[in-house]
Image (cartoon, rainbow, N blue to C red):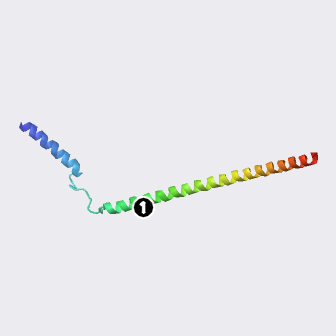
Amino acid sequence: MRKTIAVLLVLFASVFAVACGSDSSDDSSGQEATSSTQPVSDDSMKSDDDAMKEDDAMKEDGDAMKSDGEAMKDDSDSMKSDGNAMKEDGDSMKADGDAMKNEG
């Protein structure tokens, strides 16, 4: 029973040491040098995340507008070609009408 308790106590101590971040091989310091670091608040991290999300959303909006502009240009080009085809059809109809007039 004592042996089991001793093993559990050693196991608990080693888990606690790992969780606290102390290094048992280096006994000179005894503590990590974390006093010079500043804690980061959750609010500042949240605002940074929100700002990054807004930047991503703006980029996606810009990309969407760019693709919309390209689609509009393609539509305009296809309308131009449709207009040219209609003009050619009109010209051929006019020629047919003139030919029918001459025959009649």
* Residue drawn 18% across the image and 45% down it: 14
Question: Which residue position holds label 1?
Answer: 51
Q: Quadrant of residue 70?
A: bottom right
Comparing 62 with 40, the one in front is: 62
Q: What is the number of callouts on the image?
A: 1
Quick one: label 1, few (<14), some, or many (20+) residues within 10 Å?
Answer: few
Can you give x and y, in whole percent of width and height, for residue 77 in the image?
Answer: 69, 53
* Residue drawn 33% across the image and 62% down it: 43
**Quadrant containing the N terminus in the rendered view:** top left
Can you give x and y, in whole percent of width and height, for residue 2 in the image?
Answer: 6, 38
Q: Say what amino acid the circle numbered 1 marks.
A: Ala
> Left or right: 39 with respect to 75?
left
> Left or right: 35 with respect to 60?
left
Residue 93 in sight here = yes
Residue 40 in sight here = no
Residue that lies at the very extreme toward the left in this rendered image: 1
Can you give x and y, in whole percent of width and height, for residue 88 in the image?
Answer: 80, 49
Comparing 24 with 15, the one in front is: 15
Comparing 85 with 70, the one in front is: 85
* Residue drawn 80% across the image and 50% down it: 90
* Residue drawn 79% across the image and 52% down it: 87
Q: Quadrant of residue 63?
A: bottom right
The secondary structure type at the circle numbered 1 is helix
